[in-house]
C-alpha cells in the first residue's frame, strides 16, 4: 500500500460523546474523509491519532485500516506525517470503540477480529489479538 495523505473532517473531537451512547467519550479525534465513499455508502470514517487536542480538520497519512468483523464499515487510522506507531499503540488508542467488536470467535477465545494494513510492512491477511478485554 502506498502512503496516502487525507483530509479528515472531525465530527467527534477528543472529549466529545458518541451521539447514540453518551457514556462513550472519544479519547482521540474521529471523523470522516469527505468524498471517499466507504462500503456502507457514507463518507469514510477515520480515527486521527497523534493529535492530543480537539481539532475541526486534520491532514495526515493513513497508516492502518481496521476491517471490522461482520460489518462493512472499515475505519481508517490517520496520523501526522513522520510519526510512527506500532500495532499495539494503534489498538490501545482505538480500543474504546473497537471493543464492541470483541466476541468469541474462530480462534477459540475472546479476540479482536480486524486487520491492520501497515504502510511499512507487507499486507497481513488477518490476525487475532487476544487479551485486550
Image (cartoon, rainbow, N blue to C red):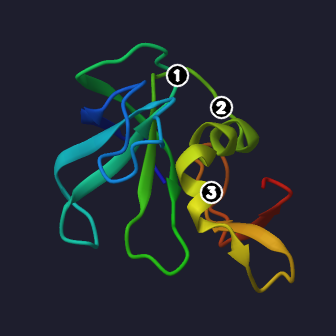
**Dividing the picture into quarters, in which one does residue 33 lie?**
top left
- Report if the CB atoms under discs 1 and 2 are less than 8 Å apart: yes
How many other residues sit within 10 Å of disc 3, few (<14), some (14-19) or many (≥20)?
Answer: some
Disc assigned to residue 85: 2
Q: Of the residues under marks 1 and 2, which one precedes in the sequence?
A: 1
Q: Which residue is mark 3?
A: 99
Q: Is residue 75 visible?
A: yes
User: What is the CA distance from the residue labelled 1 to the residue labelled 2?
Assistant: 9 Å
Q: Is residue 119 visible?
A: no
Q: Residue at x 67, y 49 (%)?
A: 121
Q: Residue furthest top?
A: 53
Determine whether the residue tagged by mark 1 lies in a helix, strand or loop.
loop
Q: Which residue is mark 1?
A: 50
How many other residues sit within 10 Å of disc 2, few (<14), some (14-19) or many (≥20)?
Answer: some
User: Is 107 situated above or below 1?
Assistant: below
Q: Quadrant of the C terminus?
A: bottom right
User: What is the CA distance from the residue labelled 3 to the residue labelled 1?
Assistant: 20 Å
Indicate the position of residue 30 as horizontal and vertical percent values: 37, 38
Nearer to us of marks 3 and 1 is 3
Q: Of the residues under marks 3 and 1, which one precedes in the sequence?
A: 1
Amino acid at each position: 500500500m502506498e502512503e496516502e495523505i487525507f483530509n479528515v473532517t472531525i465530527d467527534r473531537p477528543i472529549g466529545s460523546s458518541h451521539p447514540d451512547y453518551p457514556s462513550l467519550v472519544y479519547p482521540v479525534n474521529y471523523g470522516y474523509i469527505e468524498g471517499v465513499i466507504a462500503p456502507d455508502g457514507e463518507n469514510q470514517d477515520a480515527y486521527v491519532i497523534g493529535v492530543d487536542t480537539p481539532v475541526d480538520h486534520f491532514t495526515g497519512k493513513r497508516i492502518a485500516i481496521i476491517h471490522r468483523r461482520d460489518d462493512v464499515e472499515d475505519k481508517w487510522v490517520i496520523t501526522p506525517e513522520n510519526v510512527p506507531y506500532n500495532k499495539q499503540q494503534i489498538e490501545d488508542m482505538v480500543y474504546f470503540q473497537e471493543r464492541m467488536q470483541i466476541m468469541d470467535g474462530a480462534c477459540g477465545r475472546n479476540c479482536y477480529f480486524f486487520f491492520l494494513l501497515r504502510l511499512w510492512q507487507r499486507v497481513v491477511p488477518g490476525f487475532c489479538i487476544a487479551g485486550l478485554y
